[in-house]
Amino acid sequence: TGRSAVSADDLHGGGAGWGFDADAETSRAPAEEAALDALELEQLLKMADAAGLPLSARGRVLQEQRSKRQAKAENLLLEVGRIAAKEVEGLSEGQASAKQRAEERAAELNEQVASLGEQLADIIREQLAAAKGLVDGGKSRRAAARAA
């Protein structure tokens, strides 16, 4: 009377039988996220391509900006090389200042390329994580971190 026919040992014979499966899955997710965080942009692009994930609209814009700035930086470095080839004969004041401006602008563009690459890598990581089901309740890791 008032007692259950099921004993505690029957319910929890191998330890607590509830809640541990869900915890085990979430403990694997950070390890998979850490693995994605360790990858470089080129590796992430290859993984996304292999998984058949197209870049988001924002990702396409970032990739286009990145490639344009990369091309500009390469052109500036070519110009610096052309000017430097004339150094043997001596550079005029205008050539020396043009060389310095080109070097500074190339360095600035390279910083922008690196920043855009990081942003693009974050977008791809989020897409890959979402595709693997690592995103919590439709929130990205970035949004989840802001909420915490």
Image: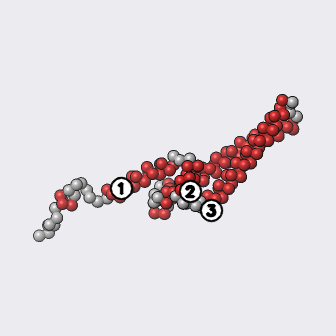
Sequence order check: which comes first, mark 2 or mark 1? 1
Q: Which mark is residue 131?
A: none
Question: Which residue is pictured at 35% across the width and 55% down the height?
Answer: 23
Query: CA–CA distance between discs 1 and 3?
Result: 35 Å
- Picture coordinates of residue 16 (x, y %)? 25, 56
Q: Horizontal placement of 101 versus 38: left or right?
A: right
Q: Please, what is the three-letter code of the amino acid marked with disc 1?
A: Asp
Q: Secondary structure at mark 3?
A: helix
Placement of 81 over or under 120, stated as above or below: above
Q: Please, what is the three-letter code of the amino acid marked with disc 3?
A: Ala
Sequence order check: which comes first, mark 1 or mark 3? 1
Residue projecting furthest to the bottom: 1
User: Colour mode?
Assistant: secondary structure
Neighbourhood count class around disc 1 (C-alpha, 10 Å): few under 14, some 14–19, many 20 upward: few
Q: Horizontal placement of 104 versus 44: left or right?
A: right
Q: Nearer the viewer, residue 53 or 69?
A: 53
The residue under label 2 is 49
Q: Secondary structure at mark 1?
A: helix
The residue under label 1 is 23
Placement of 73 over or under 133, stated as above or below: above
The residue under label 3 is 57
